[in-house]
Image (spheres, rainbow, N blue to C red):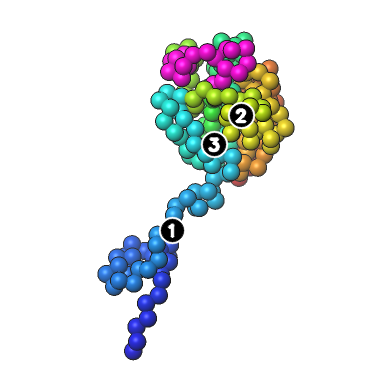
């Protein structure tokens, strides 16, 4: 009987099967890349990397896939800077249910974030004991050549651009809904927590 070798899909193989076909010399298909599966599970809004504030190491935002995400542009010397405390409280209150707060320092408004990333990180930790993830300082104003791409997409989707520090965007688990709140809206206000509750209730 004539033996016919044919390509075998790696995705259909168990480890034992993979070893067996390797020994037989008929594993002709190349391993499938992992990225398509990750992309399918991760909303397009989060399919990017951003440098971490503390050490500027790239962080994949897809690690927050499946969560309700609040994105906030922050500043250390603003009248709204005490909102760090409320943001930390909000993040801790709803963490077990799937909320994460992400902070993005910016010097765009009133030059109220002049320091280096290291200085900002020390301020956030020492002054407000911020524990939620913070990212490197970036431009968040609409229409700038170097606007943070996450903010550019959030502005486009929501139709609302930051006018000052501590503008807030709330992203649904599937990345299909974005709700924005002005700087003047306290993170623990009923309008915010009601929306957080609504989005957390959705799968």
Find residue 86 and report its horizontal and vertical position in percent: 57, 19
- Residue placed most toward the observer, 74 or 187: 74
Residue 32, numbered label: 1
Q: Do the residues labelled 2 and 3 touch (CB within 8 Å)?
A: no
Q: Is residue 196 visible?
A: no
Judged left or right of residue 162, residue 43 is: left
Which tag, 2 or 3, sits closer to the chain's start? 3
Residue 98, numbered label: 3
Which tag, 1 or 3, sits closer to the chain's start? 1
Relative vertical location of residue 63 with respect to residue 165 in this rendering, above or below: below
Which tag, 2 or 1, sits closer to the chain's start? 1
Instruction: Name the residue rendered at 63%, 32% in the picture.
Output: 152
Relative vertical location of residue 39 with respect to residue 74 in this rendering, above or below: below
Residue 45: quadrant of the picture: top right
**Badge 1: residue crowd in 10 Å (few <14, some 14–19, many ≥20):** few
Instruction: Name the residue rendered at 59%, 12% in the picture.
Output: 111
> Which residue in the rendered view is the most extreme toward the left?
23
Instruction: Name the residue rendered at 63%, 16% in the picture.
Output: 109
**Badge 3: residue crowd in 10 Å (few <14, some 14–19, many ≥20):** some
Find residue 9 and report its horizontal and vertical position in percent: 43, 66
Judged left or right of residue 44, residue 125 is: left
Relative vertical location of residue 97 with respect to residue 167 in this rendering, above or below: below
Residues rendered magenta in the picture: 105-123
> Which residue in the rendered view is the most extreme toward the bottom?
1
Residue 145, numbered label: 2
Quadrant into which the N terminus falls? bottom left
Check disc 2 and report its element: helix, strand or loop: loop
> Which residue in the rendered view is the most extreme toward the front?
145
């Amino acid at each position: 009987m004539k033996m016919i070798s044919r390509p075998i899909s790696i995705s259909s193989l168990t480890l034992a099967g993979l070893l067996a076909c390797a020994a037989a010399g008929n594993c002709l298909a190349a391993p499938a890349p992992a990225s398509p599966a990750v992309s399918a599970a991760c909303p397009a809004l989060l399919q990017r990397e951003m440098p971490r504030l503390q050490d500027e190491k790239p962080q994949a935002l897809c690690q927050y896939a499946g969560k309700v995400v609040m994105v906030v542009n922050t500043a250390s010397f603003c009248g709204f800077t005490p909102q760090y405390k409320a943001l930390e409280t909000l993040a801790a209150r709803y963490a077990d249910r799937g909320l994460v707060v992400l902070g993005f320092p910016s010097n765009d408004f009133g030059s109220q974030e002049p320091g280096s990333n290291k200085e900002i990180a020390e301020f956030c930790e020492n002054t407000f004991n911020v524990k939620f993830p913070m990212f490197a300082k970036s431009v968040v104003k609409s229409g700038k050549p170097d606007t943070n791409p996450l903010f550019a997409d959030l502005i486009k989707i929501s139709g609302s651009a930051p006018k000052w520090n501590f503008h807030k965007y709330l992203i649904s688990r599937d990345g299909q809904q974005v709700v924005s709140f002005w700087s003047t809206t306290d993170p623990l206000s009923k309008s915010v927590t009601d929306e957080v509750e609504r989005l957390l209730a959705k799968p």
